[in-house]
Amino acid sequence: MVGRKEPEETRREDMLRAAYDVAARQGLEALTLRTVAARADVSHGTVVFHFKRKHELIADLLDRVLYATAVLRVPDAVTQITRPSERLDALLRTEMERLSSEPRHFRLFLEYWTIGVRSAPIRRKIRLALDSYRAALASFASPLVTDELSVSPATRAMERKSGVTVEGVASVGVSLIHGCALQAVIDPKGFDVRRHFAAAAHMIERLSVVDAAP
């Protein structure tokens, strides 16, 4: 039994990769058990054995879509930046460029978002993924919003009055990143991620002044 389990798991992963490739190229409407079988070079019966129905395949595929679109990627070069404002700036730029460079991933995310309107399990999984995405981004915003404010009571009072919080900065950051990806889906040839980021940079410009305080 142990000897058979690993090949079956490997075969299932191969089929999920094939399903993702079909869906990314043609959309979820084109995804069928037969198209997956053809793409993975396995029999239709093998796909049925693992996924039973199309809706089960679509549900299992969501994890891969969320990994591509709602899991923060932090390159080593970004983690090595010491100034919080510059680190957050670099991270936002990297994520915007990553998601806008392959709009098919985000188009699939949007398709699942539409399904989530009618499906509570899909909606819940997307919500949890976005919660984790914001939390990961918040860890980079926290030194900028919290630690740096401690050097100046006057600045701290100003930030409290303006309502700036770690969670707020993280939420805006995710909105900017996904907004960038959305525009890349709508207009992949005309969209310029650098111009988009130039506008986004104004979001952290005020916080950067705090970061520069002695």
Image: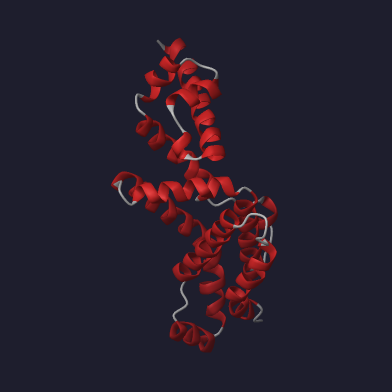
- Residue 82, image x and y in percent? 67, 64
User: Where's residue 118, x and y in %?
Assistant: 30, 48
Q: Which residue is drawn at 44% across and 86% down?
A: 161
Number of labels in the image equals: 0
Q: In which quarter of the image is the N terminus?
A: top left
| Image quadrant in which you'd find residue 85 | bottom right
Where on the picture, by quarter, is residue 4?
A: top left
Q: In this view, does 45 lie above or below 185?
A: above
Query: In the image, is residue 38 above or below residue 95?
Result: above
Q: In this view, does 2 lie above or below 198?
A: above
Q: Residue at coordinates 50% horizontally, 64% vertically from top-left?
A: 175
Q: In the figure, residue 52 lies in which quadrant?
A: top left
Query: Colour mode?
Result: secondary structure
Identify the residue at horizontal 62%, vertical 77% (top origin).
205
Is 33 placed left or right of 176 in the picture? left
Task: Find residue 73 and report its horizontal and vertical position in percent.
Answer: 59, 50
Looking at the image, which residue sits at the far bottom?
Answer: 154
Q: Which residue is drawn at 56% across and 34% down?
A: 21
- In depth, the one of 180 and 140 nearer the eye is 180
The C terminus: image quadrant = bottom right
Spot occupied by residue 106 in the image (x, y as percentages of width and height): 53, 50
In this rendered view, identify the residue nearer to me: 56 or 128. 56
